[in-house]
Image (cartoon, rainbow, N blue to C red):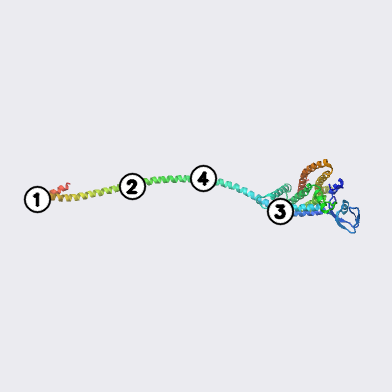
Amino acid sequence: MAGDTLTTESYIKHHLTNMTYGKLPEGYVRESYDGTTETLTQDTWTLAHNDVEMKDMGFMAVHVDSMFWSITLGLIFAFIFRKVAVGMHSGVPKGLQNFIEMIIDFIDTNVKDTFHYKNPLVAPLALTIFIWIFFMNLMDLIPVDWIPELMMWATGDPHFFFKVVPTTDPNITLGMAFTVFFLMIYFSIKEKGLMGFVKELTLHPFHAGKWYVDIFLIPVNFILESVSLIAKPISLGLRLFGNLYAGEMIFILIAAMFGAGLFLGVLAGFLQLGWAIFHILVIALQAFVFMVLTIVYMAMAHDVDEEH
Amino acid sequence: MNINLTLIGQSITFLAFVWFCKAFVWTAIRNAMDEREAQIADGLEAADRAGKDLELAQEKATQQLREAKQEAAAIIDAANKRANQIVDEAKTAAHEEGDRIKAAAKAEIDQEVNRAKEALRSQVAGLALAGAEQVLEASIDEGAHKALVEKLAAGL
């Protein structure tokens, strides 16, 4: 527990709040921790003190913790793989190279099973997604209080927000999902042409072949296809977010139990262990699912004569 | 749980890492792996070929050995035959030579004997005559008896 004065509710809330750096508008009334208020004389970029401020920052804000961990973990991924790629040789592989090759082979098999077209971007895309998301999910296994407490201690600010698991931030998961969506549309148009893409949206699933019937079918088709198209990135991003958020939530609830007496504390210990073991599965599985769906979407984007 | 600039930040970061992965990681590792795959395939093929080559070589060696044995047997046969022939020839030649030498020796002996006989004969005639002369002294008509004595000497 983060201090005795905290209630369980505020403890959980604190753990689920991102460290947000954003713009507060001119004339905004800020409330400090000690209750005094302060009116901003100009637009200010600053760290939010509470979730009201975060809401008021609107779109012009960045989750510093999410971005920090996401980039750090991405750099770790890039560093490890680059190191192996530089020392790569076709002789007898050893140690880390062996392991990395195993991963590459695994990704390659998955890509080749689903994606039968020529596109050199898809395999690296799948690899990046798998490893990066895996790393980000893995942060969930670090006991929930360690890093936030460390940051509070380091900054001396007891209200310092610091979320450790980037994939429990929908911005991160949706950011990746929409990038995949963008690539999907880009390759769709590149492979089928703009008209082909538009036709795909308007002439499926209902197609009569006679123009005077089609005229009425096209709007229906367009609505159906648009919904299914938009649903792809949303479901992709929210699936990952939902799974990890739920997992994180349970870890936080278990952590809250540690402060509630000996019996509950011991029980929480067992629950923590069990959930962590189960969560290993979720971590790898969600990274894998995100990767496989990305490959499938890429394949759909390249699929010229799609049948419904 | 606000949607904000993090969304865009993450998108850009994501694309950057994908680009990095494609440019500096994937191709290098995949190429090396493909290269190794090719090497292993080549190696296996070479091993296969070597096995077949070995089999062939062994077959060939066996055949050559058999041929060599046959040849050797033939050579030994021929040599034996030739040796026998040479021995036979040598025997014949030796016989002939021996015969010839014997004949020559015999002829020489005969000649020698004749010559000795001749010499002896002439000396015996002289000696007999001298002996008879001394025994008979003057009573002997040399002319009359000479023919007699020579006839005697010729009878030797």
Is B103 in front, or is B121? B121
Give the distance between the C-alpha atoms of the residues marked 2 and 1, in whole angstroms. 62 Å
Give the distance between the C-alpha atoms of the residues marked 3 and 4, in whole angstroms. 57 Å
Residue under label 1, please give it: B137
Looking at the rendered structure, the secondary structure element under dot 4 is helix
Q: Are marks 3 and 4 in contact (CB under 8 Å)?
A: no
Q: Are marks 1 and 3 in contact (CB under 8 Å)?
A: no
Residue under label 2, please give it: B94
- First in residue order: circle 2 vs circle 1: 2
Residue type at mark 1: give it: Glu
Residue type at mark 3: give it: Lys
Residue type at mark 2: give it: Ala
Disc 3 with disc 4 on a shared chain? no
Q: Residue furthest bottom?
A: A42
Q: Is residue A186 visible?
A: no
Residue under label 4, please give it: B63
Residue plotted at (28% across, 47% down): B102
Is A307 in front, or is A255? A255
Q: Chain of mark 2?
A: B
